[in-house]
Amino acid sequence: MDQLKYFQLILRLVGLLVCLDGLDYLREFVLIQMGYITLERTSPTLYFANAAIYIVVGLYLIRGASHFMRFAFPTDEIEDNEVSDDPVGA
């Protein structure tokens, strides 16, 4: 595997972790709405907003994060929908 593939893999793994964190915020929001958790100073909307932001960013990273890829590897070999004809990947 070359550097490009490792970078894509790391971006997707970070995206998965960010999505899981967003799902945890969503779980906490649901528990607050059901009355299992009570808050004194924090609005439940904050948990929902955090969940939405984390999930959107995580999904963007899982999809490949084309802006980050173009920034990290500014060569012409990277395209938005990179398709390789070589099944081995060499």
Image: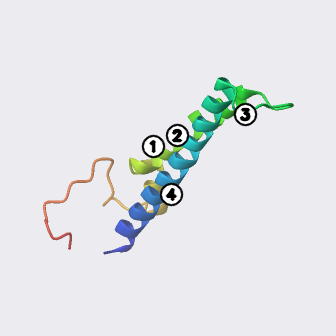
What colour-coding does the image apply?
A: rainbow
Q: Nearer the viewer, residue 71 or 24?
A: 24
- In this picture, residue 78 sits left or right of residue 83: right
Residue at which label 1 appears: 59
CA gap between label 1 and label 4 equals 10 Å
Q: Which mark is residue 14?
A: 4
Residue at which label 3 appears: 37
Place residue 49 in its image quadrant. top right
Q: Are marks 2 and 4 in contact (CB under 8 Å)?
A: no
Residue 50, position as x, y percentages in the image: 65, 37
Which mark sits nearer the N-terminus, 2 or 3? Answer: 3
Residue 43, position as x, y percentages in the image: 77, 27
Which mark sits nearer the N-terminus, 2 or 4? Answer: 4
Q: Residues within 10 Å of mark 4 (few under 14, many from 20)?
A: some
Secondary structure under the numbered disc 1 in the rendered image: helix
In the rendered structure, which amino acid carries the disc numbered 1?
Leu
CA gap between label 2 and label 3 equals 22 Å
Residue at which label 2 appears: 55
Secondary structure under the numbered disc 4 in the rendered image: helix
Secondary structure under the numbered disc 3 in the rendered image: loop
Q: Nearer the viewer, mark 3 or mark 4?
A: 3
Q: In percent of the image, x 57 and y 33: which residue is there?
A: 52
Residue 11, position as x, y percentages in the image: 46, 58
